């Protein structure tokens, strides 16, 4: 793996002993990793079902916690199963 400082110098136009094949391999690995991360982010998050009408305080607290989690996940930009 080529360190960041070397890459910054190359990007700035400085000469380097890094071979073009090494740069190409580094770029390809980075693109593959980006693709993998995008796929993970595109996967919808599935949270447990909660009753719309809880029958006790414990169930109501659980439902509130799940709903708060859903809202936080949505605000972070992630999809939750069932969202359109």
Image (tube, rainbow, N blue to C red):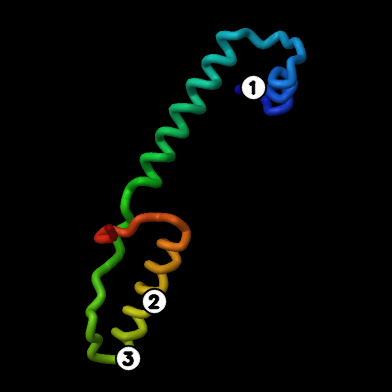
Q: Label 3: how many residues lie within 10 Å, few (<14), some (14-19) or many (20+)? A: few
Q: Quadrant of the C terminus?
A: bottom left
Mark 1 lies on residue: 2
Label whose residue precedes the other's in the sequence (2 or 3): 3
Mark 3 lies on residue: 57
- Residue 70, which numbered label? none
Q: Secondary structure at mark 3?
A: helix
Percent coordinates x, y for residue 65 in the rendering? 39, 76
Q: Are marks 1 and 2 in contact (CB under 8 Å)?
A: no
Left or right of 24? Residue 37 is left
Residue at x 73%, y 26% (from the top left corner) = 5
Left or right of 76? Residue 82 is left
Of the pair 55 and 82, the residue shown nearer to us: 82
Q: Quadrant of residue 71?
A: bottom left
Label whose residue precedes the other's in the sequence (1 or 2): 1
Q: Vertically, is 14 above or below 55?
A: above
Q: Are marks 2 and 3 in contact (CB under 8 Å)?
A: no
Label 2 – label 3 distance at C-alpha: 12 Å
Residue at x 40%, y 46% (from the top left corner) = 41
Q: Quadrant of the N terminus?
A: top right
Label whose residue precedes the other's in the sequence (3 or 1): 1
Mark 2 lies on residue: 65
């Amino acid at each position: 793996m080529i360190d960041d400082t070397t890459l910054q110098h190359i990007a700035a136009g400085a000469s380097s002993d890094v071979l073009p094949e090494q740069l190409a391999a580094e770029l390809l690995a980075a693109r593959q990793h980006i693709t993998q991360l995008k796929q993970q982010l595109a996967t919808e998050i599935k949270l447990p079902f909660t009753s719309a009408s809880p029958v006790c305080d414990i169930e109501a607290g659980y439902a509130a916690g799940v709903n708060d989690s859903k809202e936080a996940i949505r605000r972070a930009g992630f999809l939750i199963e069932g969202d359109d």
